[in-house]
Image: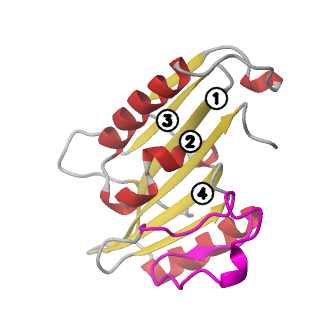
Amino acid sequence: MWNDISIESRGVARISVVCALLSALALVMVHLISQPCHAQEPEKEGLGIIVSDKARGQDVGLPLYPGSKPHKDESNDSQAARLGLWGGGSGFKLAVVKMDTSDSPEEVAAFYRKALSKYGNVLDCSHPSPAPADAEGKDSSKNLTCGDDKPEKGGMLFKSGTKEKQHIVAIQPSDRGSVYQLLGLSNWSSDDKN
């Protein structure tokens, strides 16, 4: 489902939270309306929606870097968001948090490489390498890749999980240390063979 939305091709580090959330909401609503109802897992039954300008590290599935504070910029946009929509056997949940720390990007990267490892292999999309030829096995449709995602100039981008349940960390140097963004994305469909 998210391959159709192409969130990877937009570059997580370059999209604004508001635009991403509105685009995702519109596309998922169209997808959900066109889906027939099928039997589902209990937590995925019924219809539901979450729209909030508040999110925490636990909503993303990752801890906040010790001593970090919510990012403040000149706009009035929220630096955190949660969005979810489900029904008809399909749905998604998205959480984004943007934070500041006085520590260097390298220190933040080391912390999040370890935190991301609990979800599997950690991809460094800052300097992506070509996918190995044997990665195109029968489960390759679920394998997470960097795709077109790359960090803003001078930044770092890490991913872990699967295409259906991703955890992404984007880190950018700032004049006071680092700005980092955490993104947790999960999506499901009754057509999934999980």
Say which of marks 2 and 3 sits in front: 2
Cα distance in 3D space between marks 1 and 2? 9 Å
Crowdedness near tag 2: few (<14), some (14–19) or many (≥20) residues, C-alpha within 10 Å? some
- Residue 9, position in %: x, y? 39, 59
Cα distance in 3D space between marks 2 and 4? 17 Å
Is the residue under label 4 in contact with that under label 2 (CB below 8 Å)?
Answer: no
Cα distance in 3D space between marks 1 and 3? 17 Å
Residue under circle 4?
167
Cα distance in 3D space between marks 2 and 3? 19 Å
Label at residue 82: 3
Q: If you read the primary sequence from the N terminus, does the residue marked by circle 1 or circle 3 appear first?
A: 3
Q: How many marks?
A: 4
Cα distance in 3D space between marks 1 and 4? 20 Å
Cα distance in 3D space between marks 3 and 4? 14 Å
Residue under circle 2?
1
Say which of marks 1 and 4 sits in front: 1
Q: Which residues are magenta?
A: 120-149
Say which residue appears at 60% left-offset and 30% top-offset. 91
Q: How is the image coloured?
A: secondary structure
Q: If you read the primary sequence from the N terminus, does the residue marked by circle 3 or circle 4 appear first?
A: 3
Name the foreground residue: 120 vs 177: 120
User: Can residue 88 be seen in this snapshot?
Assistant: yes
Q: With respect to residue 95, does 66 lie above or below?
A: below
